[in-house]
Amino acid sequence: MKTTSATEAQRHRGNTMQDKTLRGVLALALVAALLPAPAGAQSSSVTVIQNGTILTVTKGTIEKGSILIRDGKIAEVGKNIKTPAGATVIDASGMYVTPGLIDCHSHIAIEGSVNEGSVAVSSMVAVADVLDPTDIDIYRELAGGTTTSNVLHGSANPIGGLNAVIKHRWGKGAKELLFEGAPPGIKFALGENPKRSNFRPPAGFPQRYPNTRMGVMDVIRQAFIEAREYKKSWDAYNKRVAAGEKSAIPPRRNLKLEPLVEVLEGKRYVHSHGYRADELRQLLLLAEGFGFKVRTFQHVLEGYKIAKEMAMHGVGGSTFSDWWAYKNEAYDAIPYNAAIMTKYGVVVSINSDSAEEARHLNQEAAKTMKYGGLTATEALKLVTINPAIQLGIDKRVGSIEAGKDADLVIWDKHPLSVYAVAQKSLIDGAVYFDRKKDIEQRAEIAKEKKALLEKEKKPAEPAKKESGPGRPPGAAGKAPEKKPAEAKKPPMNAAGGAR
Amino acid sequence: MRTRLQELTAEAQRTQKMHGENKGVNALTLLTLFVALVLLAPAAMAQSGKSYAITGAKIYTLAGPPIANGTIVIKDGKIAAVGANVSVPSGAQVINAKGLEVYPGLFNAVTEVGLVEVGSGEPGTVDTNELGDYNPQVAAAVAVHVESEHIPVVRASGITHTVSAPGGGVISGQASLIHLAGWVIDDLLGKKSAAMVLNWPSLSTRPTFDFATFQVRRRPFSEAKQDYEKKVAEMENWLERARHYAQAAEKGSKDNFSRDEKLEALAPVVKGEMPVLVMTNDDRDIKNAVEFCEKQKLKMILAGGREAWKVKDLLKQKSIPVILKRTQALPANEDEPYDKPYSGPGELAAAGVKIAFATFDTEFARTLPYEAGHAVSYGLSHDDALRAVTINPAQIFGVDKELGTLEQGKIANLIVTNGDPLEIQTEVRYLFIKGQLTSTDNKHRQLYEKYRARP
């Protein structure tokens, strides 16, 4: 099949995406008065962050340092940087600057359920098709310093849907959330969730194969056997075309198998949910048998038991800080997991899997200093450069270096302290979150909400249009048809499980 | 985890089985057990009567200004002395805590510790929810699993005691105060009937996931109201009967009196002796609960209190304390400021409401210090945060004469740390529970040691 069909698949998704964006545009027009304009729209193309303690992550710490940002990229980092005329200056005196935090496991900004749980292999579905740019969690996480997220399908299936790596460009459309050029990925899941231990369909709904860890592995193996055959048929076809054969008939396209062929070809990352060492080991063996690599294990709570094997395979570990015992397969989880995996040479990240936890990934990283004695830099890496490596976007983000995207967070205290509060979050050099501005505008938003409620009580009038640039979300930053946050996300376990 | 003693006991029993002809307990077994008891008992249960002196530490008594270079003497499970000029009694084990800090042990005000081992509901590991809506007669302490792996994990974070609470139904049962160390429940038990748990019937129409239909469902208000009114009437009826029962128990004839466990359990509640832990979150529900408790003359503790900040003046006016469920939570509504759950505790404290922090669960019980610390970042004073995990919950549950500060005569639940106990990187160096130097070892550390040493 090669690139032809892959591109088609992308185009197909692209179209859906456009529809989505179109709908988004319509919605935006309807609530134009209400949606906050992106704060970033105001920024000039040259910005200098001055006088801060810069935690570059990869190049040490610079006291009283500056960062020159030009056209969304970091142009220069250092102690003695001249401020060009006309540049926007952000004073970071007494503050700390870090790269924007990266969450390697998220389910925010998904419209509806995160699980296509009806089938055991759902590789034909894609998160990018259902990105919801109005999800308030995008903004809430920005306010905690998270600027990039790996938005994953749920874990109800041994082979789940395709992921979407996004930047938290709050206020932009669905398409602009996507991290341009991020390598594509797919979600796999092992253990209790795909075998549905903590979940039974209600009466009248059939149970779904698999029901055991044996079955989970069988489903994955079977899918790759099919994918290999499928690839063979495309390879044969492409060979005939290349040889100049005009009458060659292409194989029938299979959207379920195409992403798996990409996995076999090393073009798509496998992000596999898993807990127990045994199931993780089995997936590595299976992958090695088919000749592909697992990019990351997600959760990987028993990664510390097979850190050696993980390092040998080259799989990354994306784990929680101190979660344990919330289900049986998490009973051997230990908060030292990240530290042990790190010491064995595994590329480790700390993820959230939760719209709340993603608001303080810095704190979660700090826990690895207490549990396992990682250094401050090692701890920071867990939520910056390491998840960037895992997602294949480390040339662009994850550290403060010239040439990288200006995705930065300014903190009032050292970010590994529980007392640190993010003051500003920048993406591509534009300020997308500003705590001071957020607080200043709360009264106005409360007033506007009150007015809207009053208006609701009166007979309908034609909608008035007005814009509020740079306004943080609030009463006004909400599409009227949207349900409360709880509405769209049933308990993860109930829906087949994300965790 | 099995203790070494359990292993030895099991081994002794196996030995006995192998020698089936010997019906009696042989001398060797007895000796083994005796040796095990005396020599292998962990520090948690060191010989009572042993005294300790912690010297050279900065002591945050929370009953006055910190003592820069103080000494605490612990004897017979109690704080015997604390101050700058306290002499070390002879025979006391001295802990040189120069450069370290001493605080009262942290109090996680509501958890399920001991009642839940595996959160997802492995049936064998969960003892929180009894069947039926009215179970005032059940008490958490009765089901606390003393060997739970959670207990050592939680205490390693400096939490020395907790109120473990049952859940479910309307009146779930009695929450019990337990100390987090001991061999049998007798050692752990602080106060069996610390509070009666009442799940306030909510008028909320927030969408929930309905397992029966397998869909997200928003309750119509009419349905919520009908259910609410029915439950309020039921509660009133129970309390009314409990009042009659209490009266009959005190004044009635013994011959005509038949015992009723449920009404008996409710008697101290209607007399205002036992507080009611009212679990509710939304402002409207809180207001309704306050009105109900006032009318019924119940001593209310608000538990959960996600929107307590909206009714802080009412709570202050009625002197109702609040035990806050996890600060690190998402705002209840999309249009709330992003940091509302973080700033709410500070707003309540500023309004003069007594607050305490709690995690309400088992698996995250150890994160209590960070819930409090996070609130400090958003407006709560550090002192108030510290009090909210020590003396405030002690006062709320009426045990402040025994716990919550470092004062002479109080139970010696305290921690020696290398810094601020609310900060993430701080380590608990020494831990005293009921005056016993208690190990901070736990399942997690053991697995860590085991696997970091993997060849």
Image: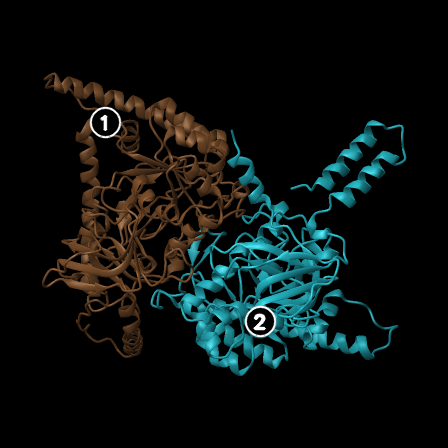
Chain colours: A brown, B cyan
Nearest to the observer: residue B42 or residue B56: B56
Q: Quarter of the image holding residue A453? A: bottom left
Is label 2 or label 1 in front? 2
Q: Secondary structure at mark 1?
A: loop
Seen at 55% across and 81% down, the residue is B318
Give how far across and how far down residue A157 sits, in percent: 41, 38
- Number of numbered discs overlaid on the protein picture: 2
Nearest to the observer: residue B424 or residue A141: B424
Q: Where A244 falls versus A301 (above or below)? A: above
Q: Type of residue at label 1?
A: Arg
Q: Where A138 falls versus A187 (above or below)? A: below
Q: Type of residue at label 2?
A: Leu
Same chain for mark 2 and mark 1? The answer is no
Seen at 24% across and 68% down, the residue is A471
Name the residue carrying label 1.
Answer: A252
Nearest to the observer: residue A240 or residue A314: A314
Q: Could you tell me if residue B165 is visible in this image?
A: no
Q: Quarter of the image holding residue A316? A: top left
Give how far across and how far down residue A26 sits, in percent: 18, 59
Q: Secondary structure at mark 2?
A: loop
Q: Is residue A478 left or right of residue A333?
A: left
Give how far across and how far down residue A111 sits, in percent: 31, 52
Q: Could you tell me if residue B34 is visible in this image?
A: yes
Determine which of the numbered discs, if any, sits on residue B321 in the image.
none
Seen at 77% across and 38% down, the residue is B9
What is the quadrant of the N terminus of chain B in the image? top right
Q: Is residue A479 left or right of residue A353?
A: left
Q: Mark 1 falls within which chain?
A: A
Determine which of the numbered discs, if any, sits on residue B62 in the image.
2
- Separation (CA) of disc 2 from disc 1: 75 Å
